[in-house]
Amino acid sequence: MQPSNLLPISNPNSPPSMLIPTSSVTADTMLVRSEPHIVHSSSSSTILVVQDDDDSKIETKPLLTRAFSYSSSSSSSSNNLVMQQQRRRRIASANSLLSGAVEGCRREMGRAASDTYVVTRLSFRLLRYLGVGYRWIVRFLALGCYAMLLIPGFIQVGYYYFYSSQVRRGIVYGDQPRNRLDLYLPKNMNGPKPVVAFITGGAWIIGYKAWGSLLGQQLSERDIIVACIDYRNFPQGTISDMVKDASQGISFVCNKIAEYGGDPNRIYLMGQSAGAHIATCALLEQAIKETGAEPRASWSVSQIKTYFGLSGGYNILKLVDHFHRRGLYRSIFLSIMEGEQGLRQYSPELMAQDPKIKNAVSLLPPMVLFHGTADYSIPCDSSKSFADTLKALGVKAECILYEGKTHTDLFLQDPMRGGIDDMLDDLITLIHGDSSETIKAKSTPRKRLVPEFMLQMARSVSPF
């Protein structure tokens, strides 16, 4: 045995030898209690000869400490490595989120700037059509007063529109700048809900999807999904563009609404004022396509359970002079309707009477037309005459009149008044049927949004 490998600790009274292996894997060391002459060695290991007194103990702490120190050091290094990797991942994730947020904000700002540019350019173009006639100046001032009087309600509805988690704004349904829609979803999505595809009014010039936010809010609170469809207005588009956009939006609702919790078997189409005219044209045009030799379109008239028209005009040829007297000049209206031939082509009442499309008319769903008897923007005779024409052609149609109600009473003032709203109650009953009373009882009572005296003043100055 080589002296360099022997670490002697002398004790002449030690007991017989005993080998004690250490737990270290890094130093091949063995503690040996033995007689001085009994030792073993190898080239790769060290043997300690320990000779102690009877009361002495074998001290292994330094060796164990070195062993565990190595293990602890290795474990600590591994933990540090894992923590560094996790920190790098968190930093990368945060950077990715920040980049995504910045990019999203940049896209939104770009879209807003683009829309602002388009609206500004089209506004100047529209002014060239309108001129500066006194009628438009008076109506513009009246519109400003009307909006100011209803501002308490607009603020509350606007807050709901921009901040409610139940509103999905700006869903793209087509490739045109205005091809977007807003969805108003009920809070309780415990099953497929009936759906109303709604097309807003605006004299074919100032229509916008947000105008339907009050109706969307009130119907969604009563377990109905509302899809407010936007479309190109004049002068960005003419009537054929508006009908095309509306049809494309209806197609999106028919084919995609199940993804948002809607019932594809309970889809209703509704339009208000100019939107009612556009929606009816889209419905009739689709029926004509289905009876012709054209390939099957992306939606079918049979998917519409019922059509609801609110304060709509359906015989444009008869209304053109009425609109001219109220400030929508004939020259402008002809530009919107694509000339004299468009007055007949886009008059649903006249189109339905054409014997060539008799089969198409038979495909129309039940038609329910709401109108106020004090409507001076579009007289209620428009709805009455259209309902009578449809009945004569075998279509199930009904005209519901509301005594003393104006063009905006049914759509704005009455909903902002709170309490009982006859038109809204009739609409809910037609959609929910037998369960309508239960739905009404469970719904939040309609609250007043605007004081009564302001509603009365707004009614008196309304330009509509």
Image: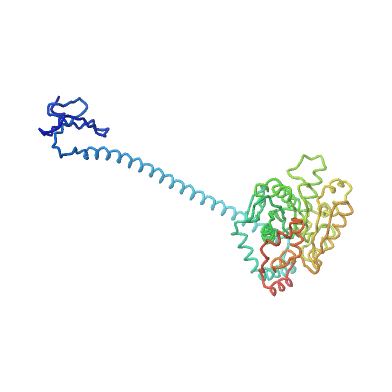
Q: Is residue 421 above or below residue 42?
A: below
Work out which quarter of the rendered image holds the C terminus and state it. Answer: bottom right
Q: Is residue 63 left or right of residue 407?
A: left
- The percent position of residue 98, horizontal first and vertical second, equals 48, 50
Q: Is residue 64 left or right of residue 361?
A: left
Report the colour scheme. rainbow
- The percent position of residue 314, horizontal first and vertical second, equals 82, 57
Q: Is residue 243 left or right of residue 388?
A: left
Viewer-proximal residue, 288 or 126? 288
Q: Is residue 94 above or below residue 149?
A: above
- The percent position of residue 393, horizontal first and vertical second, equals 88, 51
| Residue at screen point 80% across, 63% down | 371
Viewer-proximal residue, 456 or 166? 166
Can see residue 124? no
The quarter of the displayed image where residue 272 is located: bottom right
Q: Residue furthest bottom?
A: 453
| Residue at screen point 43% across, 44% down | 89
**Count of labels in the image:** 0
Viewer-proximal residue, 293 or 366? 366
Can see residue 438? yes
Work out which quarter of the rendered image holds the N terminus and state it. Answer: top left
- The percent position of residue 35, horizontal first and vertical second, equals 13, 29
Q: Is residue 19 left or right of residue 375?
A: left
Q: Is residue 103 above or below residue 62?
A: below
| Residue at screen point 20% across, 25% down | 43
